[in-house]
Image: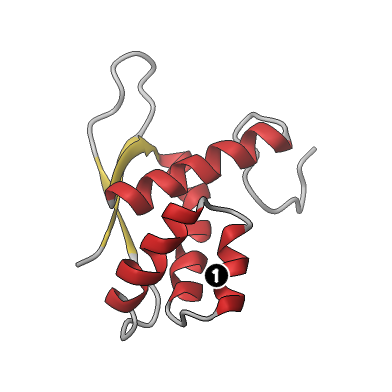
Amino acid sequence: MRHRKAGFTLDRTRAPRVAMLRQLATSLIVHERITTTFARARAVRPLVETSITRSRKPTLATRRELLKNFSPKTVERLLTTLGPRFAQRAGGYTRMTKRTPRRGDGAAIVTLEFVS
């Protein structure tokens, strides 16, 4: 039973789940918009939001923290583009917009994007 267990498992063990979430977050940071399932979007949203919040202050410590999860190219984009863009915003950097369900299995599909 999963009583009082926080977090999202997404029907995966830890290593594949972490890899998938990092890749989704990287895709969102690079392309600024991704289309994925509702459950995956809900799981990746906190990772992206905390990364943007960290990147608002471009210090060496911040860069090293971000390099634990992302590639150097992605970290550079966070610190030079997205951090300054959301410097005056107090959280809530992403938006989920519902799309039509997926044809094969009827899964709820959303578009996850940065607010302007």
Can you identify the residue that label 1 sits on?
Answer: 63
Q: Is 33 left, or right, of 56 in this rendering?
A: left
Q: Determine whether 25 is above or below 12 in the image.
A: below
Of helix, strand and loop, which one carries label 1? helix
* Placement of the C terminus among the 4 image quadrants: bottom left
The percent position of residue 61, horizontal first and vertical second, equals 61, 77
> Callout 1: 10 Å neighbours few (<14), some, many (20+)?
some
Task: Name the residue at 36% across, 33% down.
Answer: 108
Which residue, as the protein is rendered here, is positioned at the far top?
A: 104
Q: Is 68 left, or right, of 2 in this rendering?
A: left
Q: Tag 1: residue type?
A: Arg
Task: Name the residue at 65% across, 39% down.
Answer: 9
Residue 52 image-quadrant placement: bottom left
The scheme the figure's colours follow is secondary structure
Task: Name the residue at 33% across, 50% down.
Answer: 30
The percent position of residue 5, horizontal first and vertical second, equals 75, 50
Task: Name the residue at 29% across, 28% down.
Answer: 101
Q: Is 14 left, or right, of 48 in this rendering?
A: right
The percent position of residue 23, horizontal first and vertical second, equals 49, 40
Q: Determine whether 115 is above or below 106 in the image.
A: below
